[in-house]
Image: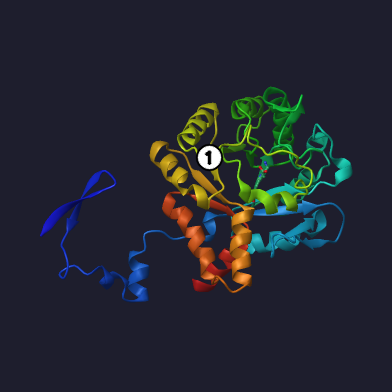
Amino acid sequence: MSHYIKKSGLYMKIIGSFPKTRLRRLRKSKWIRELISENNITHNDLVLPIFVREGKNKIEPIKTMPGVYRYTVDKLPNILKQVKYYNIPMVALFPHTPNNKKDNKGTEALNENNLICKSLKLIKKKYKEIGVMCDVALDPYTSHGHDGILIKDEIDNDETVKILVKQALLQAKMGCDVIAPSDMMDGRVGVIRKALDKNNFKNVSILSYAVKYASNFYGPFRDAIGSKSKLKKDKKTYQMDFRNSSEGLREVGLDIKEGADMVMVKPGMNYLDLITKIKKNFNIPVLAYQVSGEYSLIRNGIEKKILSEESIIESIISFKRAGACAIVTYFALEVAKKLKKIN
Ligand code: PBG
């Protein structure tokens, strides 16, 4: 017998009913669960963020993110070797800039010898097969911890964009494959695309952090890059209000028009609805960023034996189910290792 039920405004056809239909038959053993699983992850779905610091011969633990480290450039091969072995397609680089190199304009962002440039040179020389994405934003370099230029107590959009373009060009020149503006200034994607094309970087892609919320879940990251103690006010005049979702679609639409190749939703888990909506409304790859706060909550839960290890995979699968093509996550290596063991 078939009948219809109303579900979220749609009439859906249901074939059969109890006792003829027993959905538990499809869950009764591992092999059948594997057979009918609708979503799966592989190493190809993962992007690993890496923190870089100054100095030599150091791999320094980050207190707020157990299991995550800051690497000096000479020590990057330690983690890159693993990225290569486990076939993770891309890494995302983030610098921890020493205080004496920070100023109110984030000048260090444009230094050809900054941590990001040095790391890019090393990776593109010795690990060519690994894709590299770099954030375009000034927060790792500013004395006030904001992503842009402060003029009269306000983050000035257009003055900031002028610097971001230079930052993007420098990253491209050093070999960056994917330019990732995470600053949330208006119009920056179009200006960056134009500048890249004009300077012969037509094959460098743009992954726009199109939907980036002014979130409380970035805390551990700000600690990791050393901007936390610097930041006086919140970032609510440029990052999105977490009560909004349609606004996120407007952001995506604009960024696609301006030339974005891919878009990011950030944070991930609280904003799965946005991933699904983007997937439905636009034909563009959507990535999810499982941010530092999400990572640390799960990691601490596991360390305190409140959560099981499997909660990591569950959290990552939720992004796939929502419609993400890839996930930026501090768990990337751990997940890739687990997957390799299983297969
Ligand atoms: C910088 C940036 C942030 C994150 C990535 N790039 C923090 C912020 O906007 O304050 C957060 C990532 C994380 O929490 O893991 N624009």
The residue beneath circle 1 is 262
> What residue appears at the point 37 percent right and 75 percent down from the top-left corner?
30
Q: Locate residue 155 relative to residue 216 in the image: left or right.
A: right
**Where residue 21 appears, x then y in whole percent?**
18, 67
Q: Is residue 198 above or below residue 113?
A: above
Q: Nearer the viewer, residue 140 or 123?
A: 140
Image spot of residue 159 (x, y percent):
72, 24
Q: Is residue 2 left or right of residue 241?
A: left
Task: Tell me where residue 176 sits by quadrant.
Answer: top right
Secondary element type, mark 1: strand
Residue visible at 54% across and 30% down in the picture:
259
Q: Hey, what amino acid is under mark 1?
A: Met
The quarter of the picture showing ligand 1: top right
Q: Quadrant of the N terminus?
A: bottom left
Above-or-below relation of 127 to 276: below
| Percent coordinates x, y for residue 228 in the rendering | 75, 47
- Count of numbered marks: 1
Q: Is residue 131 visible?
A: no
Is residue 90 visible in the rendered structure shown here? yes
Residue 139, image x and y in percent?
Answer: 74, 40
Residue at the left extreme? Answer: 1
Q: Who's the residue at 60% across and 30% down the image?
A: 189
Q: Nearer the viewer, residue 309 or 163?
A: 309
Find residue 14 and report its image quarter. bottom left
Q: Which residue is more in the foreground, 218 or 23?
A: 218
Q: Residues within 10 Å of mark 1 (few under 14, many from 20)?
A: many
